[in-house]
Image: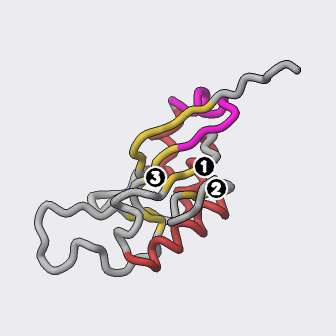
Amino acid sequence: MALAAVSLTWGGDTTLGSSYGQPPHAGWPQLAHIAPWLRASDVTALNYEGTYAPGGASKCGGGRSNCFAFQAPGRNARSLRRAGVDLANLANNHAYDFGPRGYASTRRALRRAGVEPTGAPGEVR
């Protein structure tokens, strides 16, 4: 029995929006130049730092300094799929930047875009 080769591409910390501004065109220009390599892999995964949330209070409230919370519109998740991303890890320090509501909204936006979220406790994909 012959073994088949499988290619995997893993992207590090990625975000498509923050309180400092939203990238133009839903973040596509940030990804367009690497999309051919992402699409060429059998599986492309990345660590998504931030949320696709509709707003709300961030973890940085109360006058905290040196705090970063990342939030982008849910439509920006489509740019990940367009670039060839299959799987987004959310097991990181920015997954709850906008609380449980932001986390749940992020998972929904990713799924709607065709990107499978992973990283919840006990969840392995």
3 with respect to 102 (left or right): right
**Percent coordinates x, y for residue 32 in the rendering:** 53, 35
Instruction: Return the disc, 1 or 3, that comes first in the chain's sequence.
Output: 3
Give the amino acid type for the residue marked by disc 3 in the picture.
Answer: Tyr
**Residue 113 against residue 9 in the figure, above or below:** below
- The residue lying furthest to the right in this view is 1
At a point 56% along the width and 57% down the height, the residue shown is 118
Q: Which residue is mark 3?
A: 48
Q: Where does the image place residue 112, in percent across and percent down from the top left?
A: 67, 64
The image quadrant of residue 95 is bottom left
Residue 1: quadrant of the picture: top right
**Left or right: 111 in relation to 48:** right
Label 2 residue SS: strand
Mark with earlier residue (3, 2):
3
Looking at the picture, how far across and down is residue 33, in whole percent?
51, 30
Provide the residue span drawn in magenta.
34-45
The circle on residue 87 is: 1
Q: Residues within 10 Å of mark 1 (few under 14, many from 20)?
A: many
